[in-house]
Amino acid sequence: MRPLRLLVIASLFAPGLTFAASREQQEMQRDIAQLQDQVRMLQSSFDQKMASIETLVQQALDAASKANTSVSVLSAGVGQTLSRELGDRLTPVAGLAAKVDNVANDTAEVRNAMSDLTAQVNRIQQQLTDINNAIKVIQAPPAAPPPPLTTQAGLAASHPAARFRCAPGSRFHSVQ
């Protein structure tokens, strides 16, 4: 009869112990699931924002390229039209060559300004690419630290003064 009583008492306490361990495991699994959901949400948000930034940068590059092409075509057209009109109608006017040169210089400056703008947009795109790469590197798990040096020889070799040796007999030489 006595072994039966012990068995009944033990069975009453055993489910409580397994329930506590199971409850802790359930809480831990719930916390891990919440963290995974948060990481997924952050990644999704980041991907959406990077996609919109890339779209905007591409639109800016396309607009700059179209503007550069338009300015080049316009510059060539204006230069040809001015040269033709000035050559035909204003040949006897003094100083005509200086005005044509000024217009050519102005159009060259506009072309240079557009080239500078295109270069700036390209630099911005490169910076965005660098930022994207940096974020990917930050998201990577960190490397494990090297094991600490515990031997006396290892500590002496890692000390900066261990690289220098003094000649025997000098006043800085110490006998070990």
Image (cartoon, helix red, strand yellow):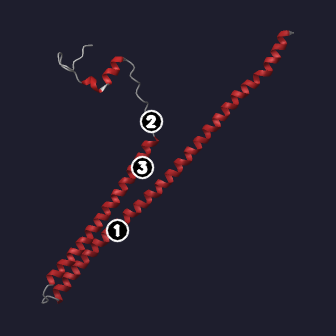
Of labels 3 and 2, the one closer to you: 2
- The quarter holding residue 152 reads top left
Of labels 1 and 3, the one closer to you: 3
The residue pinned by badge 3 equals 132
Residue positioned most to the front: 171
Chain-order first, disc 2 or disc 1: 1
- Residue 154 drawn at (x, y percent): 34, 20
Q: Secondary structure at mark 1?
A: helix
Up-down relation of residue 153 to residue 79 (above or below) = above
Residue at image location 40% in from the left, 27% down from the top: 146
Distance between mark 1 and mark 3 Cα atoms? 27 Å
Distance between mark 2 and mark 1 Cα atoms? 44 Å
Q: Nearer the viewer, residue 129 or 31?
A: 31
Q: Secondary structure at mark 3?
A: helix
Chain-order first, disc 1 or disc 3: 1
Q: Are marks 2 and 1 in contact (CB under 8 Å)?
A: no
Q: Amino acid at mark 3?
A: Asn
Residue at image location 41% in from the left, 63% down from the top: 59
The residue pinned by badge 1 equals 66
Q: Nearer the viewer, residue 53 or 138?
A: 138
Q: Amino acid at mark 1?
A: Lys
Q: Secondary structure at mark 2?
A: loop
Chain-order first, disc 3 or disc 2: 3
Q: Are marks 1 and 3 in contact (CB under 8 Å)?
A: no
Q: Amino acid at mark 2?
A: Pro
